[in-house]
Image (tube, helix red, strand yellow):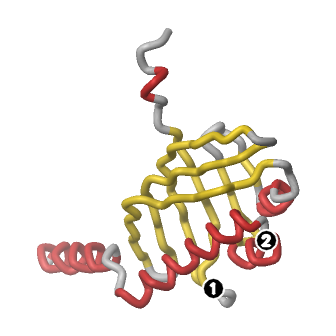
Amino acid sequence: MTKWILVLLSVTVLSAASPDPKTEKEVLAAMEAYKQAMMKKDAAALSKILSDDLTYTHSSNLHQDKAAVLASLTGNTVVEAIDFKDLKIRIYGNTAVVNGDVDFRNNAAGKVTVSKLNVLHVLVKGPQGWQLVARQATRYPDPAAAGKK
């Protein structure tokens, strides 16, 4: 009996991590809406995508809540591009875990920087649709600086 319970639990856990195509498209659409709102500095659109209890952690270890992320849109830095690469989506009920590589190209007063990151996004589906509740970014080491000490 214990053997069958373990088999059933294993099948349940494995199937939970495989999103159906419709759900995966919804999550990718939310990620695209987040990207567009960041690049356009559209606080109204971004506010709909960000959960009220957001935890947003930058690769610099800066931690922000929803209000701080929205306030940062008024700064002089312009997000010129956000390129998602190799995103992996896992769905657990009404929770989506999205991770992959992301290149951010920022322009601050004419100085362009590109950050190559690995980012973990956690979204939850509620009455407003899929919303970002957590983000954790890790910066890849600069290969040009690897040989310098």
Farthest residue to the top: give it: 149
Q: Earlier in the sequence, mark 2 or mark 1?
A: 2
Q: Position of residue 16 (x, y in %)?
A: 34, 78
In what element is the residue under mark 2?
loop
- Which quarter of the figure has residue 109? top right
- Which quarter of the figure has residue 123? bottom right
Q: Indicate the amino acid at tag 1.
A: Gly
Taking the spot 28% from the left edge, 79% from the top edge, the residue there is: 15
Q: Kindly identify which residue carries mark 2.
A: 42
> Is 71 in front, or is 80?
80
Q: Is residue 3 left or right of residue 149?
A: left
Q: Residues within 10 Å of mark 1 (few under 14, many from 20)?
A: few
Q: Residues within 10 Å of mark 2 (few under 14, many from 20)?
A: some
Marks 2 and 1, how far apart in space?
A: 22 Å
Q: Is residue 119 above or below residue 54?
A: above
> Is 26 in front, or is 78?
78
In what element is the residue under mark 1?
strand
Q: Which mark is residue 12?
A: none
Q: Is residue 16 left or right of residue 67?
A: left
Q: Position of residue 73 (x, y in %)?
A: 81, 59
Q: Is residue 9 left or right of residue 129?
A: left
Q: Position of residue 4 (x, y in %)?
A: 14, 79
> Is 57 in front, or is 109?
109
Q: Is residue 21 above or below residue 135?
A: below
Q: Indicate the amino acid at tag 2.
A: Asp
Taking the spot 70% from the left edge, 64% from the top edge, the residue there is: 38
Taking the spot 65% from the left edge, 37% from the top edge, the residue there is: 60
Q: Kindly identify which residue carries mark 1.
A: 126
> Is 55 in front, or is 108?
108
